[in-house]
Amino acid sequence: MAREQLQVLNALDVARTQWYHFTAIVIAGMGFFTDAYDLFCISLVTKLLGRIYYFDASSATPGTLPPRVAAAVNGVAFCGTLTGQLFFGWLGDKMGRKKVYGMTLMLMVVCSIASGLSFGHTAKGVIGTLCFFRFWLGFGIGGDYPLSATIMSEYANKKTRGAFIAAVFAMQGFGILTGGIVALIISAAFKSHFDAPAYRDNRAGSTVPEADNIWRLILMLGALPAALTYYWRMKMPETARYTALVAKNAKQAAADMSKVLQVNIVDEREKVEELTMRESNNFGLFSREFARRHGLHLLGTTTTWFLLDIAFYSQNLFQKDIFSTIGWIPKADTMNAIEEVFRIARAQTLIALCGTVPGYWFTVLFIDTIGRFTIQLMGFFFMTVFMLGLAIPYHHWTTPGNHIGFVVMYGLTFFFANFGPNSTTFIVPAEIFPARLRSTCHGISAAAGKAGAIVGAFGFLYSAQSRDMSHRDKGYPPGIGVRNSLFVLAVCNLLGMAFTFLVPESKGKSLEEMSGENEEDEPPVWTAVSKPPV
């Protein structure tokens, strides 16, 4: 039996969409914009790093990052992100969402700039410094996942909560797109000022000394959007749900939300005390009670995010390799270093513009209409279909004249990743767990996703290598090839569909309904296919 909702929480649940909602979306969303820019911009410059720091005059092909170095450069930020998600997720429940929110942003600003200033007397020194700062950059980015999602879910009304959280996450698409556009502008500017021959015409002259500034500028510009929103992030009041249900300060929660909602809210100290003192609302993360109530939910959110990110990040980080394989980007020895950055950036910008960004905003439009469960299941299904559509006739796609078809199909997998599990796996963990464990559980779910991203980043790097040595990157052992790698990713998506059935539907319900915090007796455990009694 459900108890009467606290007035301050009920006021948030039924509030009409107001200016403060959009302010919160922008403040939280700019963090995600920065996250995506910083995580994915590295894929635009890894080829350039190889040309600059691993040049071999005796080689017929431009320098490339050795296998272990490439894996470290691409994956080290994810290792930091995973750690940050666990640490800041836990800290957000202990210290409050607002107090921790500023720490993550400043860490991102400082480490973005420091990444571009990476130094060393040798190639190993520069790359080692870069990896060090990108780990701590990832650590700050990791904190933004649970905190942004939790803050937005606790500020939103229950009618449009899904769309608001999705809008925050959709800024990731603009971050990826902006990274490509920035790389295009910078490389085009350098290209017009520093003309250089193709590698096969002049091996040493194809990479001008000034090219070293390109990757540094691209990485450092990631600090700008985060720095611009720091002041506003610090002005946001703590969420009422944390203040009332975790900090147990009914007076402060009522005062904060009275200002935000511009209505008079009575503080209900006795009610808050009674609510928070109940034994059913004091179980811990590792308790039997948590396992009984939310164990399957946490299993569902972690496994689906893990499986999704294997596919999503392996595709995103290694687009340049896939495009080179099918011939959409010319062979490396036919271009100079700056031209190669420009071509890679152009290809990734087109995919982001046509497939990635629209998918996020389709989720924003439809999530509160058709629900999280349906969108996630549909997304995994179509990702499986399109990846099989790429893999089965793979040889057809690699023949001249068929590249555009490949790019369209490839773009559709991104569309349904973002109008699908890439959005919903972020949204649902912020809605279904108790307030005192919400940030922690979201951090655990997100960390499982980043573990999948690490598998994708490190695994795809090796698995996509051809068995034919003439088509294999220098220094790599034979892999299973791009075609078979796409089959593996399709299987991951199929498993994601299966585990989606463990994830509950939260459309139209308050956070307390989903977590059971407002229940007198034992709360029901809703599943994706079960419905609450009318």
Image: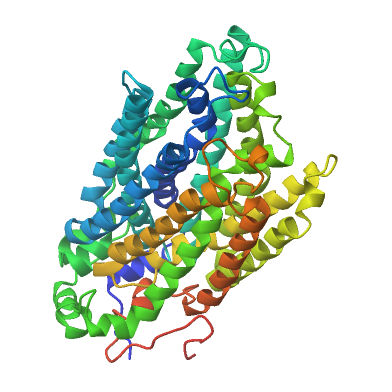
What percent of the width, then of the height, locates residue 155? Answer: 36, 59
The residue lying toward the viewer, choosing from 44 and 505, is 44
Residue closest to the eye, 19 or 463: 463
Tell me if 53 is positioned left or right of 478 in this view.
Answer: left
Residue found at x 40% / y 41%? 72
Percent coordinates x, y for residue 462 in the rendering: 53, 48
- In the rendered structure, the answer to whether residue 172 lies left or right of residue 319 reads left
Q: Nearer the viewer, residue 499 or 105?
A: 499
From this viewpoint, which residue is outermost toward the right? Answer: 401
- Is residue 17 visible in the rendered image? The answer is no
**Residue 381 in the image: x percent, y percent?**
65, 68
Q: Please say if 219 is above or below 52.
A: below
Image position, residue 407 (x, y; %): 73, 45
In the picture, measured across the screen, residue 326 lies left or right of residue 458, that is right
Q: How many marks are shown on the rendered structure?
A: 0
Q: Would residue 432 be visible to someone looking at this image? A: yes
Q: Residue at x 60, y 67 (%)?
A: 491
Q: Considering only vertical position in the picture, is 288 above or below 272?
A: below
